[in-house]
């Protein structure tokens, strides 16, 4: 007789209901019902409880009743207690493996989803995994998870064997990729002390290329700056501030070079600041200054002094990295690193205050930074900054502009201070704004920073075509091309300007206004919607900075060389007339039209020079009154190594 029948028979013999037996065994009535129906088997502990309740042994409970069954029933009777326990354990193991297989399947789906998102969306936006070994490792985990789940869920032996064979081949391939990524394409990652920033260095030992990358979400990276020299051996990373990390390395000739990773800003984050200007003045060692350490930044350069040291560096030898660090170089090799501490800020004159200036020697061995504090009075303005005119002079400027046009309609005489003459007959506010801002930026070329400005919108706030105030919003890209072997560095930001535009004879008198209130003087406000450029290419300009190029192009092409390469490759059939600086080429001049190839600055990837092909109505684009059209954009790699990588 089966166990289920024994339990039911002995319960009834005792005169108990299923509810009463359930209470004695501390289980639910449904559990007793399933035992008696043969739908489940009591555990070993419950079997002992049942036997105690019935006053018999466990063996008597699970064996058939000799009085009720023939003698040969023992040969074909119900399983023993050990067999029942083994069966229960087998079911539990099967359930456990099934649960593990489901978990592995869920993990596999998650990994597959991450890979699909990464390769279809993330990589299309210029990002990749933070280390090259992550992708093959995820693929290995994916295959392993699918293999484990398939070995449990797939019942057909033939399919299991085929799946296992495919899995072994895939795992061998991904394992080889993982080994190559770790050995040939290592990635160095370093976190700042507060964990908010991380430096990611990507190396390729096959090509010798090393790249400083930006990271996002701790999982992805994007190439930012390529190291100008081939790295030999390990790199040294030293965080000088929470957002400044000096990366020192040796090249094949054992010379020491440096790349500095910077994050953030010490002033207005939408403006590009010159650090050399920000540290103007005298600085002394913060600690006990027994050695007489002193740093002086003046118009002649940056000077380091102590009892035995006197080193002078011209500003052409001070290579900026972002707005937070400088590398002081001698004959193209970095000697010292200067950085702004995180607690300081820039004041209204763009001078660094309330913080320390960090000085650290450049060497592969461990080095200790020195902290300096400002000890001299603040200058009236930054080193490369022209003091702003007092605000009360802006309103007289508007009146002076009116008087100038009345007395000199052709604007042939000297203009009021702060006013600009635009040689154009156009009345288009967008074109007038482009000319005015470009002329303004021409005056800042001495800063040594390239600027590319794209007009986002222009809105007339007051007045008419004869005299109007306009608001201009721009997207700007300021780039320091780099010197002494360092690569380009730059920042993107947005700006808003107020421009007063007064019509003269075949010209416009323009001036930047500090605010709407002061710029609107004498005008009636109007309510007009902003005007957005229909073609972004036709609403931008580029102005290159002025810099010493002695050591700038020692290991890369100059814009003029890149221009010549582009002319030879794409415009060999045309007789180009180059400008003196090699950054503009006249390709065609027929009647009232001209075709120009213009250098358009360093691209946002900092790896390519950008060029623009434009057709103009007139001798050049500055005198076409906005009658021009774009005929294409081109890029040329800054370094020859990029050509080889692309080919």
Image (cartoon, rainbow, N blue to C red):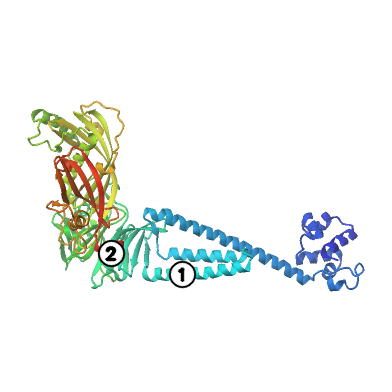
Residue lying furthest right in this view? 67
User: Is residue 363 in view from this perspective?
Assistant: yes
The disc placed on residue 96 is: none
Residue lying furthest top in this view? 524
Task: Assign a secondary structure to mark 2.
Answer: helix
User: Is residue 439 in view from this perspective?
Assistant: no
Judge by depth and name the residue closer to the eye, 609 or 322.
609
In the image: residue 523, left or right of residue 77: left
Q: CA distance from mark 2 to mark 1?
A: 27 Å
Give the class, few, some or many, for how many residues have Cα within 10 Å of label 1's Cα (few <14, many ≥20).
some
In primary-sequence order, the first of circles 2 and 1 is: 1
Residue at image mark 1: 173
The disc placed on residue 644 is: 2
Q: Position of residue 531 (x, y in %)?
A: 29, 35
Q: Position of residue 481 (x, y in %)?
A: 22, 56
Q: Residue at x 17, y 57 (%)?
A: 315
Q: Quadrant of residue 564?
A: bottom left
Q: Residue at x 40, y 70 (%)?
A: 180
Q: Quadrant of the N terminus?
A: bottom right
In the image: residue 184, left or right of residue 355: right
Q: Position of residue 220 (x, y in %)?
A: 40, 58
Judge by depth and name the residue closer to the eye, 632 or 136.
632
Give the class, few, some or many, for how many residues have Cα within 10 Å of label 2's Cα (few <14, many ≥20).
few
Judge by depth and name the residue closer to the eye, 326 or 566.
566
Q: Quadrant of the C terminus?
A: bottom left
Q: Position of residue 576 (x, y in %)?
A: 15, 52
Position of 91 relative to 395 (above/below) = below
Task: Assign a secondary structure to mark 1.
Answer: helix
Q: Quadrant of residue 591?
A: top left
């Amino acid at each position: 007789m089966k166990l289920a029948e024994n339990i039911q028979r002995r319960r009834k013999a005792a005169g108990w209901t299923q509810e009463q037996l359930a209470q004695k065994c501390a289980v639910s009535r449904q559990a007793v019902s399933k035992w008696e129906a043969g739908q489940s088997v009591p555990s070993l502990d419950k079997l002992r409880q049942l036997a105690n309740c019935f006053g018999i042994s466990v063996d008597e409970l699970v064996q058939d009743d000799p009085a009720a069954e023939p003698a040969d029933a023992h040969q074909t009777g119900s399983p023993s207690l050990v067999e029942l326990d083994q069966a229960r354990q087998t079911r539990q193991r099967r359930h456990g493996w099934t649960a593990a297989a489901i978990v592995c399947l869920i993990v596999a789906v998650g990994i597959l989803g991450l890979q699909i998102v990464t390769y279809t969306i993330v990589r299309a936006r210029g990002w990749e995994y933070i280390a090259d070994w992550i992708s093959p490792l995820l693929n290995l985990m994916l295959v392993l998870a699918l293999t484990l789940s398939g070995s449990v869920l797939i019942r057909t032996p033939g399919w299991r064997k085929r799946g296992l064979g495919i899995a072994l081949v895939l795992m061998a391939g991904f394992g080889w990729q993982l080994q190559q990524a770790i050995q040939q394409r290592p990635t160095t990652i370093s976190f700042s002390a507060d964990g908010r920033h991380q430096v990611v260095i990507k190396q390729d030992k096959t090509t010798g290329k090393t790249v400083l990358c930006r990271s996002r979400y701790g999982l992805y990276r994007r190439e930012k700056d390529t190291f100008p020299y081939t790295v030999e051996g390990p790199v040294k990373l030293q965080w000088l501030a929470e957002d400044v990390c000096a990366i020192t390395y040796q090249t094949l000739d054992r010379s020491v070079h440096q790349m500095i990773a910077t994050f953030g800003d010490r002033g207005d984050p939408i403006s590009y600041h010159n650090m050399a200007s920000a540290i103007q003045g005298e600085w002394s060692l913060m600690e006990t200054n027994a050695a007489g350490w002193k740093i002086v930044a003046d118009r002649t350069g940056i000077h380091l002094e102590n009892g035995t040291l006197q080193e002078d560096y011209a500003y052409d030898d001070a290579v900026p990295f972002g707005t937070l660090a400088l590398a002081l170089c001698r004959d193209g090799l970095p000697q010292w690193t200067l950085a702004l501490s995180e607690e300081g800020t820039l004041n209204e004159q763009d001078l660094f205050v309330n913080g320390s200036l960090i000085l650290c020697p450049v060497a592969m061995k461990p080095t200790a930074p020195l902290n300096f504090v400002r000890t001299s009075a603040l200058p009236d303005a930054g080193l490369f900054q022209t003091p702003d005119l007092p605000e009360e002079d802006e309103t007289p400027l508007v009146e002076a502009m009116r008087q100038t046009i009345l007395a000199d309609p052709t604007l042939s005489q000297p203009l009021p201070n702060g006013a600009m003459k635009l040689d154009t007959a156009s009345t288009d506010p967008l074109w007038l704004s482009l000319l005015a801002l470009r002329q303004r930026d021409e005056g800042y070329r001495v800063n040594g920073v390239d600027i590319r400005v794209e007009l986002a919108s222009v809105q007339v706030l007051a007045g008419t075509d004869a005299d109007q105030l306009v608001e201009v919003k721009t997207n700007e890209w300021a780039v320091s091309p780099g010197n002494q072997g360092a690569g380009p560095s730059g920042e993107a930001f947005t700006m808003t300007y107020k421009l007063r535009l007064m019509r003269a004879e075949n010209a416009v008198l323009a001036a930047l206004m500090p605010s709407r209130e002061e710029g609107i003087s004498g005008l009636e406000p109007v309510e007009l919607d902003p005007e957005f450029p229909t073609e972004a290419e036709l609403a931008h300009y580029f102005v290159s900075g002025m810099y010493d190029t002695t050591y700038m192009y020692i290991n890369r092409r100059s814009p003029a060389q890149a221009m010549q390469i582009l002319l030879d490759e794409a415009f060999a059939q045309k007789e180009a007339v180059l400008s003196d600086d090699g950054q503009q080429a006249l390709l065609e001049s027929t009647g009232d039209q001209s075709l120009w190839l213009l250098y358009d600055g360093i691209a946002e990837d900092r790896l390519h020079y950008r060029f623009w092909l434009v057709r103009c109505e007139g001798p050049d684009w500055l005198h076409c009154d906005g009658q021009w059209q774009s005929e294409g954009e081109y890029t040329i790699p800054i370094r020859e190594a990029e050509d080889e990588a692309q080919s």
